[in-house]
Image (cartoon, rainbow, N blue to C red):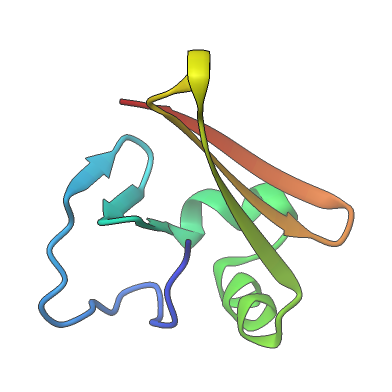
Amino acid sequence: MPSETGPSETVPNATPSRVWPGGITQSGGDFTVDAELVAPELGLSPDAFWQALQSGAISSVVERGEGEHLGSTRLTLRYFARSWCATLQE
């Protein structure tokens, strides 16, 4: 999910293995979601999103499909009663 870096910072030597439409990047088993994409869905500005993320008010879950759902991944971010979800298909 979102990394510890700010919205415009990059992680040294991190080469994305896949860039998904809409500002989602996958590097190995980790995902980074663009704050500009998800913040409004959670009722936040990008700056407020980063503050909430750093304070632990935002939680994230990555679910990998099994069986008939093999090859799909669901990303969910939660902020109190609001949530944002994306399902990615290989």
71 versus 50 height, above or below: above
User: With 90 as the anchor, is 54 left or right in this view?
Assistant: right
Q: Residue furthest top?
A: 68
Residue 35 at x, y percent in the picture:
49, 61
77 versus 74 height, above or below: below
User: With 89 as the anchor, is 53 left or right in this view?
Assistant: right
Residue placed at 50% from the left, 13% from the top?
A: 68
Residue placed at 67% from the left, 47% from the top?
A: 41
Q: Residue furthest right?
A: 81
User: With 12 as the anchor, is 63 left or right in this view?
Assistant: right
- Looking at the image, how many numbered discs can be counted on the residues? 0
Residue 39 at x, y percent in the picture:
61, 58
Residue 30 at x, y percent in the picture:
37, 60
Q: Residue furthest bottom?
A: 55
Residue placed at 70% from the left, 86% from the top?
A: 55
Camera-side residue: 45 or 32? 32
User: With 14 as the anchor, is 57 left or right in this view?
Assistant: right
Q: Where the C terminus falls, by quadrant? A: top left
Residue 71 at x, y percent in the picture:
37, 26
Residue placed at 12% from the left, 63% from the top?
A: 15
10 versus 55 height, above or below: above
